[in-house]
């Protein structure tokens, strides 16, 4: 099979040692496309297999290269494990410091970054160390590191470091100016995007914060802090599904991230409560509307006769009919049809909605929840007895099913506790449940 130019470039880079000079090139190649990400993961698997049988220098070289590759893929814990085995090497120590910094292990990061220093004026290392000192609330140590670069040409990294020190000293306006300056030089400078977003977040500038967090979270390798804060901001605005997605992305990177685990659990609980309350309120209102007798309304004799022949006694039953079904009734024409449609429109209902309740129940719900309720009941893959029950009750979609109580299902012939448990389990997997027998 032919090899693409992108694959050749990545493999050519992996054929030699990985270091600070080609790390940016490495990340650009990895995230060039979905195919390049898949290729990288395949190379990681191959190198991991080789590492198991390697010895001496080959083992150390592989550990270092694989550790840097894992860091570039955002697998920080695995990167630290691999690089820790060869931490006496300067290159390995530098990238180990980066991994520790990503995992909020700042004191370890400082030690490893110092070991990996290549000169007294190593700006890249000093920027990282400034970040670590500021996280530890040590502005004096951070300022001391920046003195060596007082006359250096401005760069995104240097402006970011100055911003961190200013922020650590409480000079937030100055800090934001530095972050803005860094982004003018390098629009996708992730650390500056994050700190600027954080300051906007703290100052109540939610729209700007969301914009910056989203941009930062979309960069590679993934900026975990941006994802966490973006998730919290989404929660504040009631966007629970987006928040859950953020926390799950963090856990995909670090399954042991305790804060993400906690936030995910809390958000899922909030979402369940929100959906249940919204569903209950809408269902109660719909039950009232759908139980209204058609005899309560002034209809022409032709319309009443047609509904009597169809054994339709409530508004809920009326919504199950289609326009064609009514027009096929004798002595029922366009005038009678218009009369029926005007009656239903008073309650935002239409003919031919299946149960009618589905449309009302779904109104205003989150699109993800709406999609679940609109799925055909066949997608639950129920056993024969449960399927027969759905047919008897004329349940076509999941939104109709959840309007029934356990007692109503159990009243259907040949539907027992085993079938009931099956239905409840399938619904629970979707975060749904049957209607309570006592809605009050």
Image (cartoon, rainbow, N blue to C red):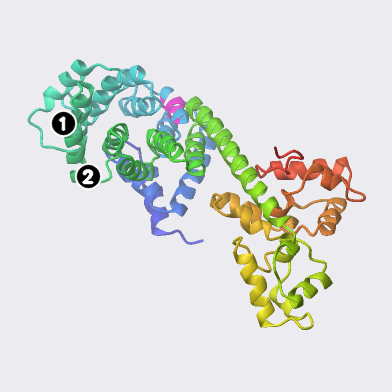
Left or right of 407 in this view: 172: left
Mark positioned earlier in the residue sequence (1 or 2): 1
Quick check: 213 above or below 351? above
Q: CA distance from mark 1 to mark 2?
A: 18 Å
Residue 276 visible to the viewer = yes
Q: Residue at x 63, y 58 (%)?
A: 359
Give the residue at mark 1.
174
Disc 2 marks which residue?
186
From this view, report whether residue 27 is shown above or below residue 305. Answer: above
What percent of the width, then of the height, locates residue 400? 72, 54
278 relative position to 84: left or right: right
Crowding near pointer 2: few (<14 within 10 Å), some, many (20+)?
some
Q: Nearer the viewer, residue 302 or 90?
A: 302
Mark carried by residue 428: none
What residue is shown at x 49% (from left), y 28% (from top)?
257
Label 2 SS: loop
Quadrant in which residue 390 is drawn: bottom right
Q: Position of residue 205 (x, y in %)?
A: 29, 39
User: Residues at badges 1 and 2 in contact (C-beta under 8 Å)?
Assistant: no
Residue 16: % across, % down: 36, 41
Viewed as shown, does residue 353 lie left or right of 159? right
Q: Which residues are magenta?
A: 79-83
Query: Helix or strand or loop: what does disc 1 sit on?
Result: helix
Quick one: label 1, few (<14), some, or many (20+) residues within 10 Å? some
């Amino acid at each position: 099979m032919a090899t693409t130019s992108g694959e050749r470039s990545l493999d050519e880079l992996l054929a030699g040692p990985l270091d600070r000079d080609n790390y940016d090139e490495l990340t650009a190649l990895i995230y060039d496309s979905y195919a390049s990400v898949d290729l990288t993961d395949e190379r990681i698997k191959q190198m991991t297999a080789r590492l198991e049988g390697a010895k001496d220098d080959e083992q150390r070289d592989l550990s270092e290269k694989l550790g840097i590759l894992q860091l570039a893929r955002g697998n920080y814990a695995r990167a630290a494990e691999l690089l820790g085995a060869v931490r006496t090497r300067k290159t390995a120590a530098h990238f180990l410091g980066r991994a520790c910094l990503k995992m909020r292990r700042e004191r370890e990061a400082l030690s490893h970054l110092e070991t990996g220093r290549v000169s007294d004026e190593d700006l890249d290392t000093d920027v990282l160390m400034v970040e670590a000192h500021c996280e530890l609330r040590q502005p004096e140590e951070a300022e001391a590191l920046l003195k060596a670069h007082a006359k250096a040409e401005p760069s995104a990294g240097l402006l970011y470091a100055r911003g961190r020190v200013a922020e650590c000293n409480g000079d937030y306006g100055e800090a934001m100016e530095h972050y803005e300056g860094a982004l003018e030089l390098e629009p996708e400078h992730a650390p500056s995007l994050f700190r600027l977003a954080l300051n906007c977040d703290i100052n109540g500038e939610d729209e700007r914060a969301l914009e910056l967090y989203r941009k930062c979270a979309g960069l590679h390798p993934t900026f975990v802090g941006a994802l966490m804060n973006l998730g919290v901001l989404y929660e504040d605005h009631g966007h629970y599904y987006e928040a859950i997605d953020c926390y799950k992305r963090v856990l995909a990177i670090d399954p042991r991230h305790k804060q993400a685990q906690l936030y995910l659990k809390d958000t899922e609980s909030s979402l369940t409560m929100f959906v249940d309350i919204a569903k209950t309120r809408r269902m109660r209102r719909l039950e009232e509307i759908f139980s209204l007798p058609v005899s309560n309304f002034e209809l022409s004799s032709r319309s009443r006769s047609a509904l009597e022949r169809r054994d339709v006694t409530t508004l809920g039953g009326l919504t199950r009919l289609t326009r064609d079904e009514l027009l096929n009734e004798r002595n029922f024409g366009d005038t009678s049809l218009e009369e029926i449609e005007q009656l239903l429109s008073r309650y935002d209902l239409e003919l031919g909605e299946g149960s009618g309740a589905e449309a009302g129940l779904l109104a205003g719900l989150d699109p993800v929840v709406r999609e679940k309720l609109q799925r055909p009941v066949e997608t639950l893959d129920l056993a024969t007895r449960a399927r027969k029950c759905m047919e008897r009750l004329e349940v076509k979609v999941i939104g109709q099913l959840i309007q029934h109580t356990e007692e109503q299902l159990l009243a259907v012939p040949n539907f027992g506790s085993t079938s009931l448990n099956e239905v409840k389990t399938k619904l629970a997997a979707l975060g749904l449940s049957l209607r309570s027998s006592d809605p009050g």
